[in-house]
């Protein structure tokens, strides 16, 4: 259970195999238990103390590192005891949830078959009978549920992002058109001193790409900042993808090229004489 749930011992130790098989009254507690029962005392000072569970004294052999919260629910409000201890103290007639971890994904189907065979054998069932009194659930089930629950969210997110890119491109194009209008005389002077049409085109395209690339970088940094904030508040693990950041800036730059083509072409096509007359 400790390994499957990725519990890291902050102070003390896990119970030994002997303690587990013998059903000793030992336990590992979470950070919430330390805070509520021991007034947030140092973890080292809690190890070796006793607390009562169901009226029975248990020795604290380990304190787990804090796991934080998910959606406001704490993941540190737990007490782990050996299964043999649970059977002796609370019986084995109530419902139980058993976690099984495989070393690699290729073993999952085989392990499921073995577990199902064991559970059917204990209930006097054969392979032809349906599962009765137990259920097997794998991560695939939860991943499917997650995929169905979030598929519409992804579609909406993609739609919102696409609309945002279109609106952003139109805004950049309008800004560049205004810039061309305000700098008509400058364009005429540049052409008069020998600037080619391609030079003007390149200048305004670079300006458009620079604006959108900076905007994309600011957006990526803002997104990472919000992700860090949500991770801190809700207790989710934080995963930052450099590839996503590069893709975000790249897409912004492509939008800058597309939205800057028309303004750049207008600037490059200006007649130098008419441009010099502009005020």
Image (cartoon, helix red, strand yellow):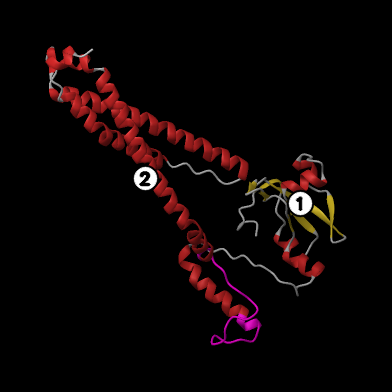
- In this picture, is 63 found above or below 103? above
| Near-viewer residue (69 or 253) | 253
Judged left or right of residue 182, residue 273 is: left
Quarter containing the C terminus: top left
The spot of residue 102 in percent (x, y) is 53, 64
The spot of residue 14 in percent (x, y) is 70, 54
Quarter containing the N terminus: bottom right
The spot of residue 41 in percent (x, y) is 79, 40
Judged left or right of residue 95, residue 235 is: left
| Near-viewer residue (9 or 227) | 227
Which residue is pictured at 32% across the width and 27% down the height? 175
Label 1, residues with CA under 10 Å away: few <14, some 14-19, many ≥20 = many
What residue did someone put label 2 on? 162
Which residue is pictured at 29% across the width and 37% down the height? 254
* Label 2 SS: helix
The spot of residue 119 in percent (x, y) is 62, 78
Residue 220: name its quadrant: top left
Range shown magenta: 120-140
Residue 46: name its quadrant: top right
- In this picture, is 44 found above or below 209? below
* Label 1 SS: strand
Label 2, residues with CA under 10 Å away: few <14, some 14-19, many ≥20 = few
**Viewer-nearest of labels 1 and 2?**
2
Q: Do labels 1 and 2 touch, CB within 8 Å?
A: no
Judged left or right of residue 254, residue 91 is: right
User: Does 124 appear in magenta?
Assistant: yes
What residue did someone put label 1 on? 61
- Give the overall secondary structure of the magenta segment: loop
């Amino acid at each position: 259970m400790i390994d499957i749930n990725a519990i890291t011992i902050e102070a003390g130790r896990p119970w030994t195999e002997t303690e587990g098989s013998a059903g000793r009254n030992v336990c590992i507690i979470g950070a919430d238990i330390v805070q509520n029962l021991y007034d947030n005392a140092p973890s080292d000072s809690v190890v070796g103390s006793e607390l009562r569970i169901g009226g029975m004294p248990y020795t604290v052999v380990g304190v787990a590192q804090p796991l934080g919260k998910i959606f406001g629910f704490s993941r540190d409000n737990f007490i782990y005891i050996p299964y043999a201890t649970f059977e002796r103290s609370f019986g084995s007639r109530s419902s139980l949830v058993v976690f099984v971890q495989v070393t690699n994904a290729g073993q999952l189907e085989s392990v499921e078959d073995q577990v199902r065979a064991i559970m059917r054998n204990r209930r006097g069932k054969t392979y032809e009978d349906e599962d009765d009194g137990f259920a097997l659930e794998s991560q695939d089930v939860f991943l499917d549920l997650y995929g169905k629950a979030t598929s519409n969210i992804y579609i909406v997110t993609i739609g919102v992002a696409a609309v945002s890119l279109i609106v952003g491109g139109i805004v950049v194009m309008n800004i560049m058109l205004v810039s061309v209008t305000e700098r008509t005389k400058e364009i005429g002077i540049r052409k008069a001193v020998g600037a080619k049409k391609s030079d003007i085109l390149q200048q305004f395209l670079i300006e458009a790409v620079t604006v959108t690339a900076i905007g994309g970088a600011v957006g990526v940094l803002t997104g990472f900042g919000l992700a860090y904030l949500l991770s801190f508040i809700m207790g989710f693990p934080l995963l930052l993808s450099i590839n996503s950041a590069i893709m975000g800036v790249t897409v912004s730059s492509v939008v800058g090229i597309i939205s800057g083509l028309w303004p750049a072409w207008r600037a490059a096509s200006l007649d130098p004489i008419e441009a010099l007359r502009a005020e």
